[in-house]
Amino acid sequence: MENSIQNSNFKVFQLRRIFLGILVLSSLLSTHAFATAPKKNASCPAGLIPKNCQRGTDKLQALTCNAYFEAGNQGFNGMVEVNRTVIARATNGTDDFPASIIGVIYQPSQFSWTLKIQRCVDPYIWEQAMNAAKMALRKGSNDKLYYHATYVSPRWKKYCTGNYKLGDHIFYSDCSRDTIQVARNRDEGRRGSMGVR
């Protein structure tokens, strides 16, 4: 009888050790998980949210990122027009631009914002940018292949015609292909040199 009580006490003791071990281990694991888990909005100031604008296959996401970072301060119409220029490039049928929206947006030396994948965004403007991207997809090309901000003066603009201003951007429908190529060669390696900002 005494042996069975000792065996029983020993089993209870072992079960308690196992139970405490599990508790300690789970506590350590959960503390580690919370300590290593990324904090929500840790890298963004208050009121902003992180968005990933990495190159992918979703053209709506790519156009939303482009509208936000290229024309987020230009209002809805400015964001739509910038993206309609991207669509014009993707559908113009020449070798000057890639034949896809994503290809145009992530084409080297076009949009400097593409250098930084993770960005902090204002949720209200992001929503406007997404709606502008949808509108641009519905409207299609604006037949403008080039644009730049009004605060820059690229060398190639004097060879372009069919321009109009919307917000802080000037859009061009016709630029001499040879002139653009000369300007590209001269500015090779500089981000945002051709057009777009």
Image (spheres, rainbow, N blue to C red):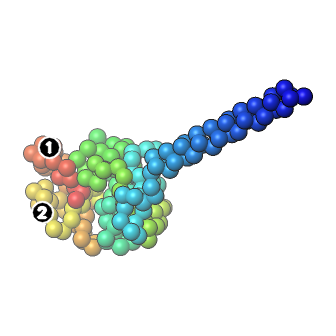
| Circle 2: element type | loop
The amino acid marked with disc number 2 is Ser
**Left or right of 95: which side holds 84?**
right
> Which percent across, then down, holds residue 25?
58, 40
Q: Quadrant of residue 196?
A: bottom left
Label 2 sits on residue = 153
Q: Which residue is mark 1?
A: 188
The one nearer the camera, 45 or 107, is: 45
Q: How many neighbours does mark 2 have within 10 angstroms: few (below 14), some (14-19), or many (20 or more)?
A: few
The image position of residue 179, as x and y in percent, is: 13, 49
Is residue 22 toward the left or the right of residue 113 in the image?
A: right
The spot of residue 81 in percent (x, y) is 35, 65
Q: CA distance from mark 2 to mark 1?
A: 17 Å
Which quarter of the figure is the N terminus placed in? top right
User: SS at mark 1?
Assistant: loop
Who's the residue at 84% across and 32% down the image?
5
Looking at the rendering, which quadrant does residue 85 occupy?
bottom left
Q: Residue at x 27, y 73 (%)?
A: 167
Between disc 2 and disc 1, whose residue precedes? Answer: 2
- Residue at (70% x, 39% y) in the render: 16
Numbered tag placed on residue 144 in the rendering: none
- Using residue 157 as the reference point, say whether residue 145 is left or right of it: right
Q: Amino acid at mark 1?
A: Glu
Up-down: is 120 above or below 46? above
